[in-house]
Amino acid sequence: MDISKYKNLKEFDSHALVVELDEPSVGLKGFIAIDRKAENFPALGATRLWKYPLEEDALNDALRLAKLMGKKSAMAGLPYTGAKAVLMLPEEGIKNREEYFKVYAQKVNELSGQFITGTDVGLTDNDLEIMSKNSKFVIGMNVPAAYYTAVGVFNVIRESLEYKFGSENISSRTFAIQGLGKTGYELLKLLYAEGAKIFVSEINIDILEQVCRDFPLVKKVLPADIHKQEVDVFCPCAMSHSINSRTVSELKCVIVAGSANNQLEDEEAGEKLHKMGIVYAPDYLSNSGGLISVVDQFENKKHDNKRILLKLSKIPAVLRAIFLRSEKERRSISSVADDMVQESLVKEVSVGVRSY
C-alpha cells in the first residue's frame, strides 16, 4: 500500500503500514496502523471502537496509538512492534455485532499474521470471542488484561512514592482517579484495599453511582475538576491527552501515574510537568501490564498468573532508572523515557532482539 499519501497527517511518523477498512454491508469503517516491522516478530495492538467526528480523526488516533504500542513493547523489553486498529462507530450503531466482528476478523486475516490484536475501548468480551472464532490472530481471551494493567500502574505508583517521599506506603496518601472504566476500576480496588483516600470521576453516571455504593469511602468529583484535586497522585485512566496546555497548570498533585494512553498532549506538557516538579510515570511503561499479560498468552498458548506478576514486578526498576537519569541529566522524565525507547530500538537492530 502506498504510505506516502498519509505523510501530511499530524500523527504520521514513518509508519510501515496503514490499512483502510471499508465494508458497508456491516457498517465497518476504520483503519489499522503498524508502527514498523521487525523480522520474525508481528506487530501487536488492540482494536478500539469509538465515535469519531471525522475519518481523519480516526486515522490519526490509529497512527498515534500504533506508535505508543511500539514504545510500550520496547519499555517492556518485548521484541514486537506496535500497531493499532481503530473502528468508527456508525451513527446509527452496529446493527449486527456478530456479523460486524466476523467481517473485521476476516480483514485481520488478510494481513497474514503481520498484525495481532485484542480488545480496547468499545469492545466487549463477547466481541473478542467472535473475533477469536474467526481469526487465529486474536489474543486476550480469558486474560484479565485490565487487572494486570492496574497491577502495573499500582507497582509504578509505589515506586514513584518511594522516589518522591522515601516510602511506598499507600495508606497515608491521597489519589484522584480520572475514569472508572476497566483499568480505572481495577486500580481503584487495589488502592482502596490499602486504605488510601480516593477522589474519583466518571462520565458514565451509572458506573459512578455503583462505584460509590461499592466503595463508600471514595469521594466523587465532577470530571472537569478531577485533575484539580490537591492530592499526592493524579491517575489519568480515561482517554488521551488529559494533561494538556490547559490542564497542566491546574494540577495540584506531586505524581502523575495512570493507565490512560497518550496522557501528555505533546512534549511541552512533559516539560511543564518537569518544571513544576511533578514526577511523571511515562504512560507506556505504567500501563504495559495489559500488553505483557496478553503476550504471555500469545507466547505460551495459555497465560500464567505467577509468570505475569513476576514480569510486572520488574517494571519499577525500569522506572527508577528513568527517574535517576532524568535527575542526573536535568531533563524531563518524558524526554528521557523517549530517548530510552529509541536507544532500545537501536539495540534491537544491532543484536536482533531487545532485552533489559
Image (cartoon, helix red, strand yellow):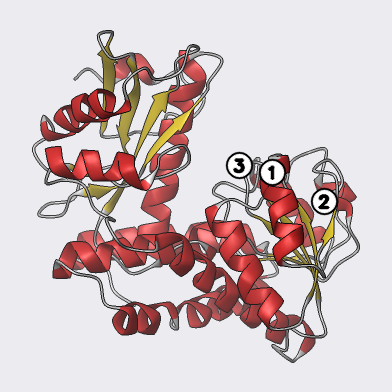
Mark 2 residue element: helix
Q: Residue at x 48, y 41 (%)?
A: 121
Q: Is residue 348 above or below residue 152?
A: above
Residue placed most toward the observer, 346 or 171: 171
Residue placed most toward the observer, 122 or 7: 122
Quarter where residue 100 is shown? top left
Q: Quadrant of the C terminus?
A: bottom left
* x and y percentages locating residue 268 in the rendered image: 71, 44
Q: Residue furthest top?
A: 24
Tell me the crowding category of disc 3: few under 14, some 14 to 19, or many 20 or more residues within 10 angstroms, Cα based.
Answer: some
Q: Residue at x 69, y 54 (%)?
A: 210
Camera-nearest label, 1 or 2: 1
Residues tagged 1 and 2 counted as in contact (Cβ below 8 A): no
- Residue picked out by circle 2: 226
Mark 3 residue element: loop
- Residue picked out by circle 1: 206
**Which labelled disc corresponds to residue 3?**
none
- Residue picked out by circle 3: 239
* x and y percentages locating residue 89 in the rendered image: 45, 21
Alpha carbon distance from label 1 to label 2: 18 Å
Q: Is residue 335 above or below residue 313?
A: above
